[in-house]
Image (tube, helix red, strand yellow):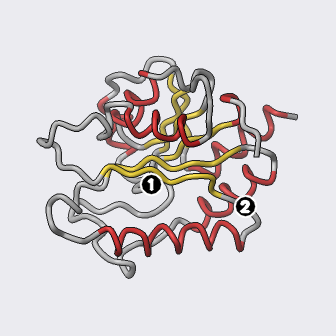
Amino acid sequence: MSTSPEGLIILDRDGVINEDSDAYIKSLAEWIPYPSAIRAMARLSQAGYTLTVATNQSGIARGYYDETTLEAMHERLRRMVKEAGGEIAHIAYCPHGPDDGCDCRKPYPGLLRQIQRKLNLATLTGSWLVGDSLRDLQAGEAVGCHSVLVRTGKGKNTETRGEGLKNVHIFDDLGTFADWLLDKKK
């Protein structure tokens, strides 16, 4: 699959693709996808966009769940998107806690750089970053992505605070973003 930065969409996971929880998503049973997000991902993939996921998963460092559990969630996500007719090119995750000093935990752009290397892209400038928090948008901004805030998950609260939202596209959910982007592509 050949990818250009303009054809790349980087999605946050919790709050964008699936329901979020302040108590963390610790098990496969707690991982509840938004049906509209799965359909949107499939539609975007069918339209030629390359879909990736960049997700902070500090629950691993905190001992709430392990990488095997996380992989089971991601495998279900891949399968659901595939069954809907789409494909996820790569899922990058940060297993570290906020005090671990890594460069992959958003708002740092390390996860996005991992995606860039995995897809062999010279740049991420012009890619799309879809998130529900300021830290998602900051990671995307650091590498030149177009920033998209969805109001699902923590998105409404992020929008209400209003900080750091200059030049940010705001949509109700991933489905309405997909509608807009696909209509724009026509």
Marking on residue 178: none
Name the kind of residue labelled 1 in the image.
Answer: Arg
In percent of width and height, residue 8 lies at 65, 37
In percent of width and height, residue 150 lies at 49, 43
| Comes first in the chain, label 2 or label 1 | 1
**10 Å neighbourhood of mark 1: few (<14), some, or many (≥20)?**
many
Residue hosting label 1: 13
Give the image quarter of residue 183: top right
Of 133 and 162, nearer the camera is: 133
Residue 12 shown left or right of residue 101 in the figure: right
Up the image or down, 74 lies above or below 116; here it is below
Up the image or down, 159 lies above or below 1; here it is above
The single residue placed furthest to the left in the displayed view is 99
Q: Measuring 41% from the left and 40% from the top, which residue is drawn there?
A: 111
- Contact? badges 2 and 1 (CB < 8 Å): no
The single residue placed furthest to the right in the displayed view is 186
Residue hosting label 2: 86
In percent of width and height, residue 94 lies at 32, 49
Name the kind of residue labelled 2 in the image.
Answer: Gly
Q: What secondary structure is marked by label 2?
A: loop
Up the image or down, 184 lies above or below 28; here it is above
Q: Measuring 72% from the left and 61% from the top, which residue is drawn there?
A: 86
In percent of width and height, residue 19 lies at 41, 63
Say how many tags the image has. 2
Give the CA distance from mark 2 to mark 1. 16 Å
Point out the image quarter for the C terminus.
top right
Residue 128 shown left or right of residue 149 in the figure: right
Of 39 and 102, nearer the camera is: 102
Q: What secondary structure is marked by label 1?
A: loop
Residue 139 shown left or right of residue 184 in the figure: left
